[in-house]
Amino acid sequence: MKLLITGGAGFIGSNFVHYWTKKHPKDKVRVIDALTYAGNRKNLEPVKRKIEFVEADITDKGKVKEAMKGVDAVVHFAAETHVERSILDPAVFWKTNVLGTQMLLEEAKKAKVPRFHHVSTDEVYGELELDSDERFNEKTPYAPRPDNLYAISKAEADRVVREFAQGNKMHITISNCSNNFGPYEFPEKYIPILITNLIDGYKVPVHGDGLNVRDWIHTEDHAKAIDLILSKGKEGETYLIGSENDVPNKEIAERVVRLYGKDPTWVKYVPDRHSNDRRYAIDPTKIYTELGWKPTITKENFDEGLNETIDWYKKSEDWWRPLLKRKAPVTNGEKRAFAFITLDREVGKVKFEYKYADEDIDKKPVLGRKMMEDKVRTGLIKTKLKTRQWYKNTSKPYRDRLLALAKDPKTQGFVDDLAGRPDVIGSVKQLKLIRLAHAPQKYGIYGIAAWFQVETAEGEKKVEGYYSWAMGTKSGAKLLVLTRYKGRISHIALLKSEKFPIGARVYDLAGGFPNLDESVFELITRKLKDELGIEATNSTMRIGEIIGLGRVMPDAGMTNNHPYLYAVIVDVDEKIFPPLNEGENYETDKGLVLWPIEKLSELINKVDDAYFLSALARLKLGGLTNIKF
Ligand code: NAD
């Protein structure tokens, strides 16, 4: 058998390659991996002579076509999995996880590959209450958390796979698995942080109260489950994989510390991470009973699995040490930045440090690929629209208008959002779309208003309006800008401007809606320049850090506008803002206000902007920067 493994240089993918080459030595294995900053060629070092490695992106049609040749089965792991990355380049989650999956399926079909297995996650189900006994099973409805871009894109990828499986003859299966642990996991992930911190004499951090529960499975058990699904899984079926090993995070830390031979004082409680889901737990009955899978590491012998992992990290310092600080390309063509990923080992958090890098970037044009992506996305939106009864009831001129908007890359995001509108909301039936409006293109569309004819449970017909903003980062961003002088955060940069619509002079945060084809990084640099007059692109003033603070929901129900909050730390040279002395205010006639950190309490009494207050609270409570308030 010839197996094509996507994402085989990543954590789980590489463990699967190791497993397969050992268990099925006669099989041919081809790995396709783009070696993003989550991929690591060294993960495959021990098996490099046994496999064929293709360095390629799964959205690169030509390369995927080539890689499919002669293949009997595809096991698809490749994905953007590091949520932190969405701060800078959220589009890449959609591109790899959704469009990439679609591309693989289409090319597999053309190459007549008979078998396809899609690897997914239990994060598509959202989170469970801490004190419930509930577990996810194959019938649990998808409910990814709205602020978890990874989970949202994986849920969409699963939908794409299911839809494809229905319309095509290929034998397709899906598995949704819980948290994996084992060798080759990057040092910024939870269990590796614990172990590598102990190796280097740091205490082990536990976020928040440590009661958050994860269901841990060893990578080898995960690999065995996929092997079984490949040989015995039924066409079109989904299998949940979990080892019934749901354990609170604090207990993991305590166990690792004990197994390492240290006393409990080595566990240190640190502020929580933003959007740290409470509990995940899987009910694996289906894969147990239908396929006879049994994990070797469960709650009873979890220590064995942890001990083995501790030993692996102890003897693999050459592997993990260089990864503590690494460079991550965050460009997709013309964008001129890259990030250094570093780990704050005291608090167990990843830090992204952004740099401009004229000489370092990959300047390949992206136009061709972008056009392809837009086309695939249009197809997906159309398919989604067609599942809606309200769409079918809508008159042809409006249907055509929707389709035209879905074709245009500048507006397709809105239609995608509209297409997500179910036929029944609460007890109200959405009958049809009867009106559509948006501002003229020249003002930059950032929302589309739609009016639906609806029918209540009592049979009353009426019209309801719905405002659709572009989703995700396109919902806008608000920036808490902090200036750092000689390594110390000294001022908060605000805007003093007229507030729409009341006309009063108030303090405001920079930010707003991005252009539709703009990344967050570009939005941030543009807003700094246009609104605060900070050109953070040279050696005297530059963006030092961007910290994602999550989304806020300013109003409920009316719209789906959930802007992101970001703290942006700008390193400044004293010559730019002359009186940048400690404790001094600075105000320009263009409305820029630099407010000294020492006098923050005075500012809080003057500013009632909800974004500002939430951004400050999250920055402080999340322990996201060493700023002293
Ligand atoms: P990872 O981030 O360690 O590895 C992903 C790999 O995919 C990397 O080698 C990366 O280079 C590659 N990749 C990313 N984008 C690509 C692209 N466009 N083209 C080609 N290759 C690309 O992730 P992981 O933790 O090993 O997860 C692998 C799969 O398992 C994912 O699909 C994930 O959703 C799923 N999963 C992970 C867990 C977990 O606990 N880590 C749990 C359940 C499911």
Image (cartoon, helix red, strand yellow):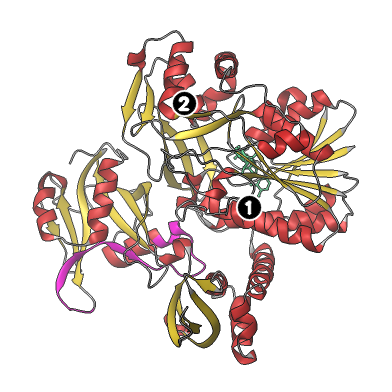
In the picture shown, does residue 255 fall above or below 515? above
- Measuring from the top left, give residue 62's x and y in whole percent: 79, 56
Q: Which stretch appears magenta?
A: 501-523
Q: In this image, 512 relative to 610: left or right?
A: right
**Residue 381 in magenta stretch:** no
Asked if residue 580 lies left or right of residue 152, the reply is left
Count of numbered circles on the image: 2
Residue 359 horizontal side relative to residue 348, left or right: right
Characterize the local packing of mark 1: few (<14), some (14-19) or many (20 or more) Cα atoms within 10 angstroms.
Answer: many
Name above or below for residue 81 compared with residue 160: above
Of helix, strand and loop, which one carries label 2? helix
Image quadrant where residue 165 sits: bottom right
Residue type marked 1: Asn
Q: Secondary structure at mark 1?
A: helix
Q: Residue furthest top?
A: 261
Instruction: Indicate yes or no: mark 1 CB to ligand 1 under 8 Å.
Output: yes
In the rendered image, is residue 541 in sight? no
Q: Which mark is residue 122?
A: none
Residues 177 and 1: in front is: 177
Residue at mark 1: 97
Task: Name the residue tied to disc 2.
Answer: 193
Splitting the image into four quadrants, where does ligand 1 fall?
top right
- Alpha-carbon span between mark 1 and mark 2: 26 Å
Q: Label 2 sits on what residue type? A: Ile
In this picture, residue 407 sits left or right of residue 621: right
